[in-house]
């Protein structure tokens, strides 16, 4: 079974000069098949003036993706098809991943249009549009979804396989073993606001995905507010993930969320952008590692106790013999 933790914090740029822009990131986790399948999702709504409803767009992206993935896995598992088939067919897997991307995009655009219909532009939004010379009447569907522009990263881990679907920036690493993780895709620096987005007219062409058959222990997915806050990603970013985030999650699970939130607040304040991170990890493996660490600590304590006892015996022996040697 997988356990998970998610944290999102608002960047300092959103409150600069009296502004009050909401956090435009959204992160979530879901499990499936009695916890044996974990799904981590994170989305980053765009911050430019044209995307003034992106905080809704990122949340809708995560909700739509979660629903599509859950429905797809349920259908696939019952029919023992695609990922759950006895003999995996690469061509069918590729087609399935593309079909999921199409379904996610269609559902997101539909939900965005529903949201716009239910929530017409209010006075503050109209003033915002006037300020930045954005259209407010006669809007096409493409113009509406642009307001909600967002990235999306989805990672699914199962005993038999894993797969990842992504559009836009952000980074996800797979945890192969404690202290060793690697990016699903090579790390790419921020593209100065030119990241791919669900709101693009050709969005379906901008998705990328990857599939694997090997078992992994967990995954960490994050928005670019975290990755770009490091001076030399990915080297120092990977070091932080392997030696700080993962260790704390495994060995200090009860306080992990509070510790991570504190760290992300610091990074969001210094870098300015929203910061979101989702980590999921195999429960059995985490318990095994914690047990090993506890046993190691107990052995150290026992060794230390033996040393103290031996020292005390030597001191008593010295007192008994009055310093004489035999």
Image (tube, rainbow, N blue to C red):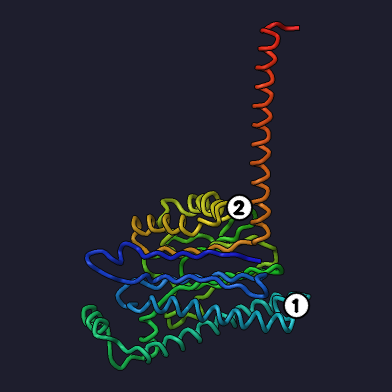
**Residue 180 placed where, x, y %?**
61, 52
Q: Residues within 10 Å of mark 2 (few under 14, many from 20)?
A: some
Write down the residue under mark 2. Answer: 180
Relative to 280, residue 302 above or below: above
Q: In the image, what residue occupies the spot 56% across and 81% down? A: 67
Q: Residue at x 67, y 70 (%)?
A: 36
Quadrant in which residue 10 is drawn? bottom left
Mark 1 and mark 2: span between their CA atoms? 30 Å
For residue 149, what is the image quadrant? bottom left
User: Foreground: 213 or 69?
Assistant: 69
Q: Residue at x 48, y 50 (%)?
A: 236
The percent coordinates of residue 254 (x first, y second) are 54, 57
**Relative to residue 246, is residue 13 drawn left or right?**
left
Q: What number of labels is visible?
A: 2
* Residue 85, numbered circle: 1
> Which quadrant does the N terminus fall into?
bottom right
């Amino acid at each position: 079974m997988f356990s998970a933790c998610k944290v999102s914090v608002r960047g300092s740029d959103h409150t600069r000069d009296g502004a009050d822009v909401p956090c435009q990131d959204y992160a979530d986790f879901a499990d499936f098949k009695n916890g044996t399948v974990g799904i981590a999702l994170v989305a980053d709504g765009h911050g430019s003036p044209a995307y003034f409803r992106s905080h809704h767009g990122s949340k809708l992206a995560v909700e739509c993706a979660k629903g599509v993935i859950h429905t797809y896995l349920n259908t696939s598992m019952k029919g023992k098809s695609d990922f759950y088939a006895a003999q995996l067919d690469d061509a069918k897997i590729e087609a399935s991943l593309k079909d999921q991307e199409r379904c996610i995009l269609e559902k997101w655009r539909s939900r965005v249009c529903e949201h716009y219909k239910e929530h017409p532009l209010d006075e503050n939004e109209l003033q915002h549009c006037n300020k930045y010379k954005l259209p407010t009447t006669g809007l096409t569907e493409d113009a509406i979804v642009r307001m909600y522009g967002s990235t999306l990263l989805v990672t699914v881990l199962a005993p038999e396989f894993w797969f990842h679907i992504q559009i836009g920036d952000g980074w996800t690493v797979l945890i192969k073993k404690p202290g060793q993780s690697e990016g699903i895709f090579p790390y790419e620096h921020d593209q100065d606001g030119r990241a791919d987005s669900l709101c693009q007219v050709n969005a379906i062409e901008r998705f990328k995905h990857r599939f694997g058959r090997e078992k992994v222990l967990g995954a960490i997915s994050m928005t670019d507010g975290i990755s770009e806050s490091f001076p030399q990603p990915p080297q120092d970013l990977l070091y932080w993930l392997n030696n700080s985030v993962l260790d704390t999650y495994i060995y200090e699970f009860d306080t992990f969320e509070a510790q991570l939130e504190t760290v992300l607040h610091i990074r969001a304040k210094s870098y300015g952008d929203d910061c979101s991170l989702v980590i999921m990890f195999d429960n059995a493996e985490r318990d095994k590692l914690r047990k090993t660490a506890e046993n190691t600590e107990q052995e150290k304590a026992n060794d230390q106790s033996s040393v103290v006892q031996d020292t005390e015996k030597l001191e008593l022996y010295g007192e008994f013999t009055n310093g004489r040697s035999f």
